[in-house]
Image (cartoon, rainbow, N blue to C red):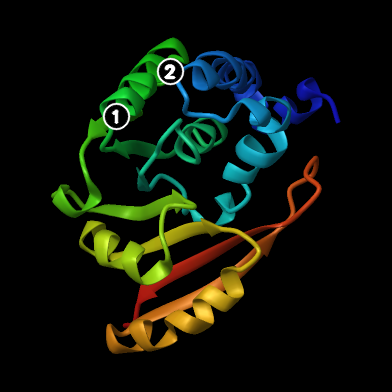
Amino acid sequence: MSGDARAEFFDAGSEAISQYVDILASRGIDWGLIGPREGERLWERHVLNSIAAESLFPSGVSVVDVGSGAGLPGIPLAIRRPDLRVTLLESLLRRANFLELAVTELGLGERVRVVRGRAEEHRETYDVVTCRAVAPLPRLLTWCLPLLSPSGRLVALKGSTAGAELTESRPFLQKRRLSAELHEFVVPGTAEPTWAVEVTRRR
């Protein structure tokens, strides 16, 4: 599937997402945020993977992308879903600078902001906390639970070992009265599924 065809998944954002892929393929690699070998797999491995779990994001909610790095999954989500208000939370200066430039160049500044900081030091709350390959689930929840609004959810994008990781995390989840569900998604144009662990507080 061509890049143009993949961009069509982003509807009115097709031009913006193509521009973002160009930014990743150039500045993202030059600045060391994307590995040199990832250049040919940006669409499948990074961009389309980032929007796989978009159905878990209710309409019009506030979202924080923890450890945003090069803006994954936050920037593709913001382009695909203009109803979302997205915060890109990143502790490293170089990555935060990259994000600031990308958000400005893509014209996303009205609904996407960059905050330089660590999750455990951030003091705001959100409807959805999301991240991609940041840390094992118990450590991730320790950082991210304070960021969740009372009815909020964590949506963590994971690899193929997500099921085993969730099973190992059950005692941690039960102790904190958390419910977790594993979702498997297949996005057209990708060769392998994406897994997401959704965590909510028990009512």
The tag on residue 131 is none
**127 or 135: nearer the eye?**
135
Q: Which residue is mark 2?
A: 102
* Numbered disc 1: secondary structure: strand
Image vertical order of residue 110 relative to residue 44, above or below: above
Q: Residue at x 63, y 15 (%)?
A: 15
Of the two numbered discs 1 and 2 on the same chain, state the one appearing first in sequence: 2
In the picture, measured across the screen, residue 184 lies left or right of residue 61, that is right
In the rendered view of the protein, which quadrant contains the C terminus? bottom left
**38 or 23: nearer the eye?**
38
Image vertical order of residue 168 relative to residue 27, above or below: below
Image vertical order of residue 62 relative to residue 184, above or below: above
Q: Amino acid at mark 2?
A: Ala
Q: Residue at x 80, y 40 (%)?
A: 189
Q: Amino acid at mark 1?
A: Val
Gap in Å between the C-alphas at discs 1 and 2?
10 Å
**188 or 100: nearer the eye?**
100
Q: Which residue is mark 1?
A: 114
Location of residue 142 (image quadrant): bottom left
Location of residue 89 (image quadrant): top left
